[in-house]
Image (cartoon, rainbow, N blue to C red):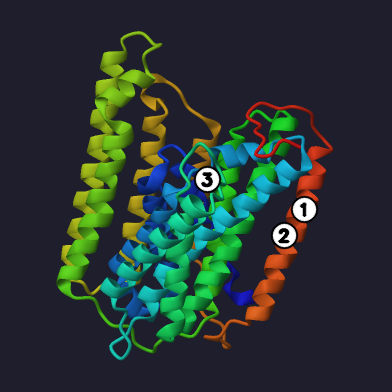
């Protein structure tokens, strides 16, 4: 895979930057937008014409997978990692490994299923969604209501829903022999889990050293970056059908509407409405004017992005080329960065360093996309050595234990810390 490092790095940086931006919006809609951008970068580096043709449905499945994990509450779990008690710090980092793993499992899994779906072996999406919904509800009521295993009381325990849905998805893949999708799901879960736990460690180190930077953003970049490189590695090292099934026109239209209109609209309604800005700008002079300008500017960005994307899709008549994928991905990506400036008060004169770094990442990604690199190695596989995967899990858990030991021995009480157990 040495020749594929450009492609892997591009996806890692794209999803990492998008996930860092996602911190400005949070919840399912922010994660869905980031997941869609990451998937489009994956399609762009794949250099497969049949994947270009289904880029919209790939973006939708990735948005759904990564977005579903957005229902998980992890603010207090992050605080557990800041504890001075080893059991609590270890619990926090381990649970972040689980939460990040669920993001990667669902995001990588649904993306992989879309890639592996072909004319001879199609994913029955209705059956899959029903099974995942049922699995999520069953495991939630069993773990949370029956056994009362609470990760983050008194907040939502929706992680159990995602865990049940993920297990149901894996069972569907194994039963229907979607081996490559299964492989991608499990590999991406490792990257997402490691990235979240390691990101929490970096965040705490930055706070201890009093680094004047948004260290929460560092943690978010970490889960996106490691989730992205593991997703890219899993996809590019797996075997796929010679020819994927082309989506129907109505499928592309539905995906276009959901990803480029509905998701941004939800982000707008939840984070960028006039009243949201009015509350955010209440301590500055003339907040009504700045709130109105900011909200209208955000709406203009959304509308322009949707129009440009729809025009490009209609102009291509669903016969997309690599430059179409790159143009749509970079437009959507740039819109996300621009919105992050607006939501944090750029129009009032407030500019944050981490936002400028988003553009640095963006420029590097554009440069790398123009490089010539082979997308796939000569050797690919549709099998996952499950023993090796468990060894990776064990290795990461040992590493997490070491990180927890380091943390509790280098700081005293710090703000934002929580204890799950009274030890």
Query: In front here: 195 or 286?
Result: 195
Give the left or right position of residue 257, taking residue 66 as reference: left
CA–CA distance in space, label 1 to label 2: 6 Å
Image-quadrant location for residue 393: bottom right
Place of residue 384 in the rendered image (x, y in percent of width and height, measured from the top left): 58, 81
Are discs 1 and 3 less than 8 Å apart at CB?
Answer: no
| Dot placed on the residue nearer the N-terminal end, 3 or 2 | 3
Residue on which disc 1 sits:
401
Q: Position of residue 192 (x, y in %)?
A: 56, 58
Query: Which residue appears at 36% of the width and 24% of the height?
Result: 347
Image quarter where the C terminus lies is top right
Q: What residue is pinned by disc 2?
A: 397
Q: Mark 3 = which residue?
A: 360
Q: Is residue 8 visible?
A: no
Viewer-closest of 313 and 423 = 423
Q: Of all residues shown, which one is farthest toward the front?
A: 146
For the N terminus, the quadrant is bottom right
Mark 3 or 2: in front is 2
Question: Which element type, helix, strand or loop, lies under badge 2?
Answer: helix
Residue 81 pos. (x, y %): 68, 41
- Tell me: residue 40, above or below residue 300: below
Q: Nearer the viewer, residue 109 or 228?
A: 109
Q: Is residue 304 left or right of residue 113?
A: left
Say what secondary structure mark 1 lies in: helix
The residue lying at 37 percent from left, 44 percent from top is: 336
Which residue sits at x=33%, y=59%? Answer: 327
Mark 1 vs mark 3: give the one in front.
Answer: 1
User: Measured from the top left, where is residue 319 in percent x and y?
Assistant: 23, 75
Q: How many marks?
A: 3
Q: Do callouts 1 and 2 mark residues in contact (Cβ within 8 Å)?
A: yes
Quarter of the figure with residue 171: bottom left
């Amino acid at each position: 895979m040495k020749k594929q490092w450009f492609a892997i790095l591009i996806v890692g940086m794209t999803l990492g930057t998008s996930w860092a931006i996602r911190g400005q919006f949070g919840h399912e809609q922010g994660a869905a937008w980031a997941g869609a951008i990451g998937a489009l970068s994956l399609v762009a580096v794949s250099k497969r014409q049949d994947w270009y043709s289904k880029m919209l449905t790939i973006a939708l499945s990735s948005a759904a997978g990564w977005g579903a994990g957005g229902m998980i509450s992890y603010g207090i779990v992050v605080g557990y990692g800041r504890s001075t008690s080893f059991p609590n710090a270890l619990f926090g980092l381990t649970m972040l490994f689980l939460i990040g793993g669920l993001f990667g499992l669902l995001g990588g899994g649904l993306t992989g299923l879309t890639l592996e779906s072909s004319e001879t072996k199609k994913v029955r999406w209705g059956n899959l969604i029903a099974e995942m919904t049922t699995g999520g509800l069953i495991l939630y009521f069993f773990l949370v209501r029956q056994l009362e295993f609470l990760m983050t009381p008194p907040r939502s325990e929706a992680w159990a829903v995602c865990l049940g849905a993920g297990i149901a998805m894996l069972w569907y893949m194994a039963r229907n022999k979607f081996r490559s999708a299964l492989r991608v799901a499990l590999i991406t879960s490792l990257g997402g889990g490691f990235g979240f736990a390691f990101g929490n460690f970096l965040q705490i180190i930055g706070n201890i050293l009093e680094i004047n930077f948004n260290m929460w953003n560092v943690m978010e970049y970490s889960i996106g970056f490691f989730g992205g490189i593991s997703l890219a590695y899993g996809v590019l090292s797996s075997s796929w059908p010679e020819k994927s099934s082309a989506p129907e026109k109505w499928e592309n239209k539905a995906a276009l509407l959901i990803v480029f209109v509905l998701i941004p609209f939800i982000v707008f309604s939840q984070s960028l409405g006039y009243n949201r800005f009015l509350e955010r700008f209440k301590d500055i002079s003339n907040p009504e004017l700045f709130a109105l300008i900011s909200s209208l500017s955000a709406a203009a960005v959304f509308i322009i992005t949707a129009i440009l994307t729809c025009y490009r899709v209609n102009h291509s008549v669903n016969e997309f080329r690599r430059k179409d994928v790159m143009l749509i991905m970079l437009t959507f990506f740039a819109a996300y960065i621009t919105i992050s400036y607006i939501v944090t008060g750029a129009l009032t004169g407030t500019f944050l360093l981490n936002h400028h770094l988003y553009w640095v990442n963006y420029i590097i990604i554009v440069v790398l996309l123009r490089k010539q690199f082979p997308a796939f190695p000569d050797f690919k596989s549709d099998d996952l050595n499950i023993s090796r995967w468990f060894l990776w899990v064990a290795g990461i858990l040992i590493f997490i234990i070491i990180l927890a030991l380091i943390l509790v021995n280098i700081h005293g009480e710090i703000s934002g810390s929580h204890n799950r157990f009274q030890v």
